[in-house]
Structure formats: structure tokens, C-alpha cells
Amino acid sequence: MAGSVSITGIEGIPEVQAGDDLAHFIAEAARAQGVQLQDDDVLIVTQKAVSKSEGRYVILDDIEPSALAIELAANWEKDARHVEVVLRESKRIVRMDRGVIICETKHGFVCANAGVDASNVPGERLLLLPADPDASAARIREGLKSETGADVAVIVSDTFGRPWRTGYTEVAIGVAGMLPIIDYVGKIDTHGRELKATWICVADELASAAELVTGKINRVPAALIRGYPVPRGEGTAREMVRQAETDLFR
Amino acid sequence: MAGSVSITGIEGIPEVQAGDDLAHFIAEAARAQGVQLQDDDVLIVTQKAVSKSEGRYVILDDIEPSALAIELAANWEKDARHVEVVLRESKRIVRMDRGVIICETKHGFVCANAGVDASNVPGERLLLLPADPDASAARIREGLKSETGADVAVIVSDTFGRPWRTGYTEVAIGVAGMLPIIDYVGKIDTHGRELKATWICVADELASAAELVTGKINRVPAALIRGYPVPRGEGTAREMVRQAETDLFR
């Protein structure tokens, strides 16, 4: 339909291994699907695929759990080594209860278990978040540019819970080639009033839109959004981390 | 592109007045745009258009502010009548600071100023959230069915802030003809592991996707999402309200 924004899953990407060139995989799969990347497309890649390509694995057998991790794990029938990894990936524990640890990660993101993940990960390993998801996004963007010539924006996305509302949604944890937030402050609405306090986190909205095609079961680790006037610029996911002193919701 | 999900703004809907038949407006505008509604399309309508059509206005001059509202307003250079309306629309105050009141609304939603809005509203009036946004969605769904014959799912959306993360995103405050949350619990991932704790709030993801075409300035109060296998059923927005006792993020 004319004027529509489209969301297309990039299918047929093989299982990603450490050291794989994810941008190459995405470009190849898009080509095979008949999709030609264009400037101003937004490419959303799931954290899991990015972390796997970067080899962000921890071998459980290599982990020596602390007394705290052992205590927590015993209370909640968890693997103490897994708990230890969660603690190591956190710079602050927001809350601990019922076997869930809500952490502030080294990046400043607040999420369950510091993003440390065992699902969709083969063997006795855990998968960590990328060390620098903006840099991951930038590498994928550069790779796609050299593969296809197109200057796309890239989002690395992850699935986060949130307060107040049930269910998880997909959010952006890294961006490249775009501004994550549109600032409408001072713009004029249709009745001539000045809009106040209207910062829209379009990176999270794009990530959520992408989840509609990547899903959770069907191993579609990337999606392309076309037709959206993405705000270009050199943004960073740090802009999406709300500082405690301005966060009335906390 | 084949296999894509599309998001299309329904344009040319006139400024909505109290008593207007919003479903009729949407059906007419879609027709004029050459869009034929289909079963399993998702129609997202912004709260503002819904509230306007339902005449959810409060005239500021009719409001007698309480002592609390007067005190709060004086501290923050606000209109005491506006503050009074916010307090009346709340069943709990979560936090008050710097002129912002984070409220739990009568519906159970946590948001700034109980969703009471002055922007995009003409004159000395305020616009409240719909009294029952699920019922609003159901009425629009019924209206669209009788106008077009198509059994679509409907979401009433609003723009909410959130803890931890900067910027607002669009969320669902009412649904009809769909389940707002997909439950992957017990499903098997690509490595044969059982997925845990994976409830995806697809209603919020669809609302966020719609915001990519409705925007904040351009008066596009409705969007159609096509190609997404929406989980049909008789859901309610109450499923998206997280109960305090299970909310570790609070």
C-alpha cells in the first residue's frame, strides 16, 4: 500500500557461530530473498545473533561462584555459576526476589538477569550482552555498506520486561546511523499549542515493530523496516538510559 | 515485499468531534485511500481521537480545585483546576515531583498526569482517557464490521513514559478481538530448550509500530497493520496491567 512502512523478516540466516560475519550473512540472506538494501532502511538485529557472532559466551564450568551467588542459587534452585555470571555482569542490583535478579548492567540498562541468557544457546554455556552494543551496530552498518553499498541505520534489539505492565517488549540496546529519540519539544500541534515533554523513543518503537516478524521461535534474527523517515545522525543507546535524577517513575 | 508486515496510516480523517462515529470516519478514509479492510487486519486508533469522539472533555471553568490541588499547582506554576482533574482521574498517586504527577488511573495504568491532556485539544478544556478503553475498541471493531464486513482487531493506543528508559513509546490501553499477550511458556526453542517466562506484549508492540506512521504532529489518528498473525480472542487491556505482587521492577 502506498505510503506504508514495511517490516520484513530476513530469513534463511544460518545458525550464527563465534567469529561469523553477521553483516555478510544478513546481506546474503536479503539478496536470496530478493531484498535490496537501500539508504535509510532500518536493519534490526536481535541481541542473541549479535552476541553469538561476537562469541560472548561464558562456559559454566569455568565459573567459580561467590558465597552470595551460592546462597541465592540455593534459595531459588538455580545454578550458582549462572547467578555468579549475572552478578558479574551487573553494576547494581535493583531488586532480587523469587529467583529473578533485576540488574543494572554495565551499559546502564535495567533488565532481568543482566541480559544473561541460556535459552537458544547450545550446551553448558551462557550468552552475555554485547560489550558495546553501539559498536556492534556500527560494525554491522559498516559491513552492510561494504556488502551492499546502502547506508542503513542499524539497531541491536533485546527483549526486556518493564514495571507496571505485563509482558516483555523488544527494545533497542545499540544503534548506529540514527538518533534513537525524536524531540518534539517546542513543535506546534494542530491547534497551535506548543508540544511539551514529547520525546518519542523511536528506536524502541522500531525494535518492537521488528519483533512482529522476528518472533521468538522461528530463528529470524534480523528484520528490515522500510519507508520510515528514520532520523539520521550519530546517536547512541546511552541516550535511552534514563538518569535516576530525572526518572520520576522509579 | 513478500512476507512483510505493513503499517499504513489512515489519512484524511477529519477533526473528531464529540458524538462522531469514529468507525465510520476510519472506514470512509480507508476507502478513499484505496485500502479495503480485511479480517485479521489490526486497526490502531489513538486515544485522543477515541476520547474526542466520546466527548471525554472537562471544562476547566467547571472545576473547583481542592486544597491539595491548589497547593500543588502553586508550587509548580500549574493551573489548579488541571491538577484537580488529574487527582480525580487517579486511584493512586505513585509519585509527585517537579510538577509531574505519576498516577495509577482508574483503569490501573501507570502514567503521567493520569492521561489528562491539554495538547491537541481546542479551547479551555482537558481531554480524559476513555472510561473503558476495551469497550471503546469493541465499539470501533463492531462499527468497522458493519461498515466494511471485515472482522479486524482493534487497539486503542496512548503515549506513555516509562521507568529506566528515556522517551515515550506508544502502548495499548484498550483491545478488541485479540489477545494482548502471547505466552511462549513451555514452547521449545531451536535447541530443544523449553522457553521460560516469555510473555510478549504484542499489543504494545503493535501500538509502537503504529506510532511510526501516526506520529505526533500530522493528525493521523489511525493506522492499519496487515500481515501480522494477530492472536485472535476476546482479550482485555486488564491483562497488561501488572499486579503489584508480581512486579519485581517496581
Image: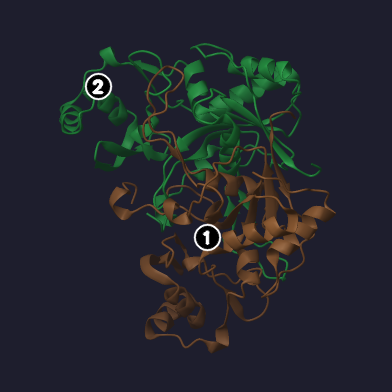
Chain colours: A brown, B green
**Quarter residue A137 falls in:** bottom right
Residue B60: image location, x then y, percent:
29, 16
Label 2–label 1 contact, CB within 8 A: no
- Residue hosting label 1: A134
Residue B235: image location, x then y, percent:
60, 39
- Residue hosting label 2: B81
Question: Which residue is found at the position 48% from the left and 68% from the top?
Answer: A113
Q: Where is the N terminus of chain A found, in terms of image quarters?
A: top right
Give the number of the mark in front: 2 or 1: 1
Residue B194: image location, x then y, percent:
66, 67
Q: Alpha-carbon neighbours of circle 2 within 10 Å: few (<14), some, or many (≥20)?
A: many
The one nearer the camera, B109 or A65, is A65
Q: Is residue A101 left or right of residue A208?
A: left
Does residue B248 appear in the picture of this structure? yes
The one nearer the camera, B85 or A221, is A221
The one nearer the camera, B198 or B227, is B227
Residue A219: image location, x then y, percent:
72, 60
Q: Is residue B105 left or right of residue A154?
A: left
Q: Is residue A13 left or right of residue A153?
A: right
The one nearer the camera, A47 or B199, is A47
> What's under tag 2, amino acid-wise?
Arg
Question: Which residue is found at the position 67% from the left and 61% from the top?
Answer: A143
Question: Which residue is found at the position 50% from the left and 82% from the top?
Answer: A81
**Quarter residue B126 falls in:** top left
Question: Which residue is found at the position 73% from the left and 28% from the top?
Answer: A2
